[in-house]
Image: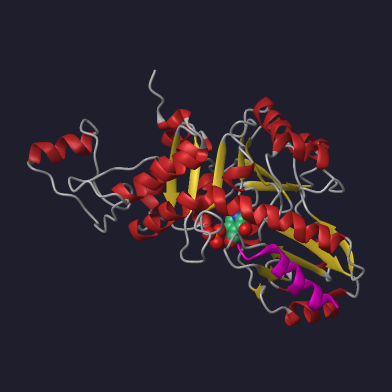
Amino acid sequence: MTKTLKDMRPATQLVHGGTLRSQFAETSEAMFLTQGFVYPTMEAAEARFKGEDPGFIYSRFSNPTVAMFEERMAMLEGAEAARATASGMAAVTASLMSQVKMGDHVVSARALFGSCLYVVEELLPRFGVESTLVDGGDLDQWRAAMRPNTKVLFIESPTNPTLEVYDIAAIAEIAHAHGAKLVVDNVFATPMQQKPLQLGADCVVYSATKHIDGQGRCLGGVILASREFIDTHVHNYLRQTGPSLSPFNAWVLLKGLETLPVRVAHQTASAAKVADFLADHPAIERAIYPGRADHPQAELIKRQMSGGSTLVCFTLRGGKAAAFAAANRLQIIKISNNLGDAKSLITHPATTTHQRLTPEGRAAMGINDGMLRLSVGLEDAQDLIDDLAQALA
Ligand SMILES: Cc1ncc(COP(=O)(O)O)c(C=O)c1O
């Protein structure tokens, strides 16, 4: 029996999956920088619009380069269907907004990326969709928050920036027992380390801006789910509202996918070494890393994830002043709020990504003033450790 790409391993799927070759039989994926498509006859146009003839109509909702990216992502994730968006936030917003209407209710873990928190806490309620925030690690809080009108549960795991890990299978079970759907923002795990759909989630979203590009070049997002979920909720919402991924960015992301397994493996191995170094350093109060035995959810991580993380979170003794002084002394590691990049990047969540929250809000998420979040890049791990050592000395 001939093996198809669907039966092969991620590294192979990410080089060949979804490729649509033009009549020129190019090796690399073609970039179709076109808004529209021409039809040979009026009858052909009519058939295309009726859905009787599969093909492209208009790049707001279908484009060959974007379709290659969607197909490759769906193959990697083990999803029936995927839709790409202009950014990760467009993917998060569409995955939530497309499922709810006035009078519905959404439950979300409190530990969310700031913009996701805005969508759940401020935007949805403006349209009559109530939201409840819970401590994502406390299953009783999820159960208690459920109402007859609860339609969607939303989590990120591992969380930003404290790398807390939530039980996706258990939260999916609670959602399904109440007729609701679970959406997982899988950015911190990457598609290489965690497969939420296999754990029972209904929809997975990514900021492709992060590891999928992985080289700091462009924004992008993607929504993955069953064919029915995409057809019922997502496709029409995206088609009519238009947060489309540009074909140019889709091409950059396709190239990013080719190297994703190699990059994530290298970055994760380096992050584990960096985490061990930080955990033993006298200037560090606490280092949190999902691959370490002292992570509070180490058992769950073993069950749910196939690897650690490319991120390390750590708290310096001496609060904000010590954190700022150390970060300012770094030479190779750059100060930036992005993550998943070839370049190692460090940020102070309390004054950047989570600045908008009150001090109490940050405390509820476990964020303190001495905390730094480090995204480990592709540099040599020992050079990163040396850089951190001189900065902490
Ligand atoms: C967990 C998480 N979700 C979503 C986003 C949003 O992605 P984007 O910046 O591509 O809109 C980010 C980062 O910005 C993120 O860290």
Q: Is residue 116 visible?
A: no
Direction left: furthest residue: 41
In the rendered image, the vertical position of residue 51 relative to residue 240, given as above or below: above
Q: Residue at x 46, y 36 (%)?
A: 75
Image quadrant of ligand 1 equals bottom right
Q: Is residue 66 visible?
A: yes
Q: Residue at x 8, y 43 (%)?
A: 40
Between 64 and 23, the one nearer to me in the picture: 23
- What colouring does the structure picture have? secondary structure
In the rendered image, the vertical position of residue 238 relative to residue 13, given as above or below: below
Q: Position of residue 226 (x, y in %)?
A: 48, 31
Between 50 and 310, the one nearer to me in the picture: 310
Q: Position of residue 390 (x, y in %)?
A: 80, 78
Q: Residue at x 17, y 45 (%)?
A: 23
Residue range highlighted in magenta: 378-393
Instruction: Report the quarter where the N terminus lies.
Output: top left
Give the quarter of the image for residue 122.
bottom right
Can residue 389 be found in the magenta stretch? Answer: yes
In-image side of 238 versus 58 (left or right): right
In-image side of 333 versus 275 (left or right): left
Between 93 and 25, the one nearer to me in the picture: 25
Can residue 161 be found in the magenta stretch? Answer: no
Q: Main secondary structure of the magenta part?
A: helix
Between 138 and 255, the one nearer to me in the picture: 255
Give the quarter of the image for residue 204.
top right
In-image side of 280 versus 26 (left or right): right
Instruction: Report the quarter where the C terminus lies.
Output: bottom right
Q: Position of residue 255 (x, y in %)?
A: 42, 54
Q: Position of residue 231 (x, y in %)?
A: 41, 35
Direction top: furthest residue: 1
In-image side of 63 versus 256 (left or right): left
